[in-house]
Image (cartoon, coloured by chain):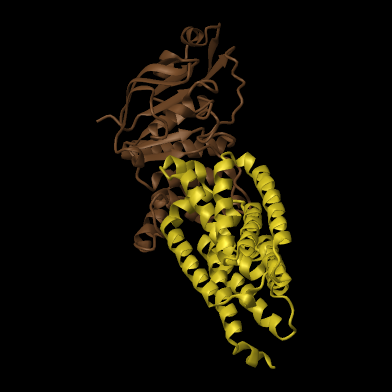
Chain colours: A yellow, B brown
Amino acid sequence: MTLLDLLELDFVQTALIAAAVLGLVAGVLGPLVVTRKMAFAVHGTSELAFTGGAAALLLGVGVGYGALAGSILAAVLLGVLSRRESDRDSVIGAILAFGLGMGILMLALYKGRAANKFGLLTGQIVGVDSTDLTLLVVSSVAVLAVLAFIYRPLFFASVDPDVAISRGVPVRGLSIVFAVLVGVATALSVQVVGALLVLALMITPAAAAMRVTASPVRATVLSVVFAEVAAVGGIVLSLQPGLPVSALVTAISFVIYLVCRGIGAVQRRAA
Amino acid sequence: MTAISLRGARLSYGSRVLWDGLDLDVEPGEFLAVLGPNGSGKTSLMRVLLGLQPLSSGTVTVAGGNRAVGYIPQQRALDQSMTLRGRDLVGLGLDGYRWGLGLRNRRERRIRVDAAIEAVGGTRYADEPIGLLSGGEQQRLRVAQALVGDPTVMLCDEPLLSLDLANQRVVSELIDKRRREAGTAVLFVTHELNPVLPLVDRVLYLVGGRFRIGTPEEVMTSRTLSELYRTPVEVVRVRDQILVVGAGACEEQTHHLTAAEAAS
């Protein structure tokens, strides 16, 4: 089959739509995640999404719902347990390790197809069906709607917390809400790129964008573009050679990151 | 109408009393310096005025409420990789606390932000990444950020710290200009009185639960400070500077609004 034939397949189109929606959500959240130095928190949350997904497999409910429950629980736990910035790193480490261990236990108890197990860790976007897609689109719209409402004070609290507090911005409450939004987005990404590689969509495109511009709006637009190129491009390129989607998604986003680092270095030298 | 009014104000954390029986009226256009060692409750006083910390007893009134307060923090090195320009920082001072994306009235907003940046002479570098600016440039933009909201009260939390003398003068003159032109009351927390001495109308000096309010001439005397510190303190005037000897004046200089003071 040629690439064009492959692109006409239903499951491929479903996967492309899912990737495009995810690219948008991850791309929009990314710059805030990077500004708030939450890369490790995203990784920790995605491991708990894996645990949730594994529990769902074992119980025979939708993996997507399990991942969602796991990562929201993780986000709330991180928000509650790490009241101080300095605690956050170690709290994430402790929760991440426990969650991963529980996930492995549940997979060991699961007697179904092995591909399902592996997919949670490394992604199986071509396995996304139409019910998963509905969940994905509805959750994404919800995340973007909440984000639009809290965006300005959240951005204020992220870049300039002391002055934001002085202006009455509920900095602490916003950080918990944001952690939950990141949790939902992470759970969705887990289905595409897998728990191990969520950072390729949530962090790398934003980090690349922030290398080449100091404008928050431009950084967000670029971050979305990069995440879309990586997510959609990764699927398209994976089809013909039959390579794993996540490998190509991570490779594309890393190449974009390297190029942006180069451009950023040249810009600074010129300035 | 007074800009800030405290009546019988008391603030204590458990058995530790930071200050008690504090009566203070700050008039529009007045420049009040707040002095005292660390832990004497300077930052807590700011938190009270910002509405972040309730008084243990007494009353506090700020004309226009805490939205009408412009806050200038101390200069701290901002992350070099921060995706933020001076213009974004100033814009947040205008409407950063509002919900939503802020897509309406972009034009009017831009005019106000530009005017505030222009007023502190920051137009040249307002579009540069803020992490690459000098401390003096960052603090000028901080002044613009506080002024863009048209405050009736400015709370300045060590805004001159770690600036060189030339920039100390520039930043304090910008604050002084504002209060003269717009009648904004200034409450200026500082370790160093001298850089702002010519601007100061009155001093609030806090030490270990005790305090004095008065003009610099009244408060900055050997007798008054010795009473406050309960140890012999010598105040010497050399040219137009005030030197305080023996008050354990070497204090650490790190405190800010979110710091542990409130948690302790």
Q: Residue at x 53, y 22 (%)?
A: B39
Compared with A5, B229 (above or below) is above
Q: Residue at x 55, y 15 (%)?
A: B244
Q: Residue at x 35, y 63 (%)?
A: B104
Q: Position of residue B103 (x, y in %)?
A: 39, 63
The residue nearer to you, when weighing A62 against A109, is: A109
Can you say which quadrant of the picture contains the C terminus of chain A? Answer: bottom right
Q: Position of residue B70 (x, y in %)?
A: 40, 40
User: Is residue A270 visible in the rendered structure shown here?
Assistant: no
User: Is residue A174 visible in the rendered structure shown here?
Assistant: yes
The residue nearer to you, when weighing B115 against B230, is: B230
Compared with B235, A266 (above or below) is below
Compared with B10, A131 (above or below) is below
The tally of labels here is 0
Q: Position of residue B233 (x, y in %)?
A: 55, 9
Can you say which quadrant of the picture contains the N terminus of chain A? Answer: bottom right
The quadrant holding residue B152 is top left
Q: Residue at x 57, y 70 (%)?
A: A23
The quadrant holding residue B175 is top left
The residue nearer to you, when weighing A54 against A157, is: A54
* Residue that sits furthest to the left in the current view: B1
Left or right placement of residue A138 versus residue A34 in this view: left
The quadrant holding residue B211 is top left
